[in-house]
Amino acid sequence: MLMSSRWIIFWLTLLGRVTQCWGYDASWRWHSTIAEFKDEDKQTPPPQSPVVFVGSSTIRYWTTLAEDMASLVTIRRGFGGAHLDDVVHYAQDIILDYHPKAVVVYAGDNDIHAGKTPERVYRDWRRLVQRVRVGGLDIPIFFISIKPSPQRWAEWTTSQMANKLVRDSCRRDDKLIYIDVASRMLTEKPPPKKWFAPDGLHLSSNGYALWVDTVKGVLKGHPCCNRP
């Protein structure tokens, strides 16, 4: 029994190291969610040349996205708890297969909370950009800044560092666009509770309204989205 337990510990440790090296961080968790997206597409064929919104629960819970972005054709593909490397792993399914004219990404929040460094978030962002480019799409990719929140306020300094790395990369490439929602949310520190659901992490209707004003303004000001 003792030997058996040691072997179990050995194999679990090895599996953890292998998945960490691959950078997928247990992306198998989302297989059922991806299957649901595919079933949805079978029932309702997706539109042509949409703006695809991908990322974690902030995208998933943005249930009013289509009406909020009424003048744009959008697809929402968020899954709660996702990290940036999950988005990379499923890029074919949630981005490339839709042949979008632009991609909007919100992720990185859960990464920092899980202990990943700002440099790791930046590397995964660059991996996502490369994945989209290698997939044949030379399109604008928008990154919504990691948001400050009351629940994760202790992590905000680290999140700011990740935001800066991504923002600086966007300044070097005119097809990468950084959308700064964080500054608008920080009317006080920590940010006001009115922007958030009772859990102090996810957005409230007020929070989404602020995001709509910011995100839509940037999208509509970009050539990819201000013409048919």
Image (spheres, rainbow, N blue to C red):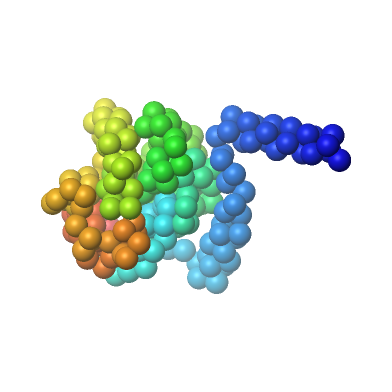
| Residue depicted at 33% across the width and 41% down the height | 155
Residue 207, located in which quarter of the rendered image? Answer: bottom left
Q: In the rendered view, tell whether residue 48 sits above or below residue 144.
A: below
Which image quarter: residue 36?
A: bottom right
- Residue at 48% across, 37% down: 131
Q: Is residue 20 left or right of residue 177?
A: right
Extreme-left residue of the structure: 187
Is residue 6 visible in the rendered image? The answer is yes
Q: Nearer the viewer, residue 192 or 147?
A: 192
Name the residue located 27 percent from the left edge and 57 percent from the top edge: 228
Residue 54 placement (x, y as % from top left) = 41, 52
Give x and y (percent) for residue 223: 23, 47
- In the rendered structure, the answer to whether residue 42 lies left or right of residue 1 reads left
Where is residue 186? Give x, y as percent: 17, 49
Which of 178 and 173 lies nearest the eye of the viewer? 178
Count the numbered circles shown. Answer: 0
Q: Is residue 227 above or below residue 169?
A: below
Name, please, the residue furthest toward the front.
Answer: 2
Residue 21 figure quarter: top right
For the question of whether residue 66 can be seen, the reply is no
Residue toward you, 11 or 96: 11
Rendered location of residue 97, percent (x, y): 51, 51
Q: Residue at x 31, y 58 (%)?
A: 200
> Which quarter shows the N terminus?
top right
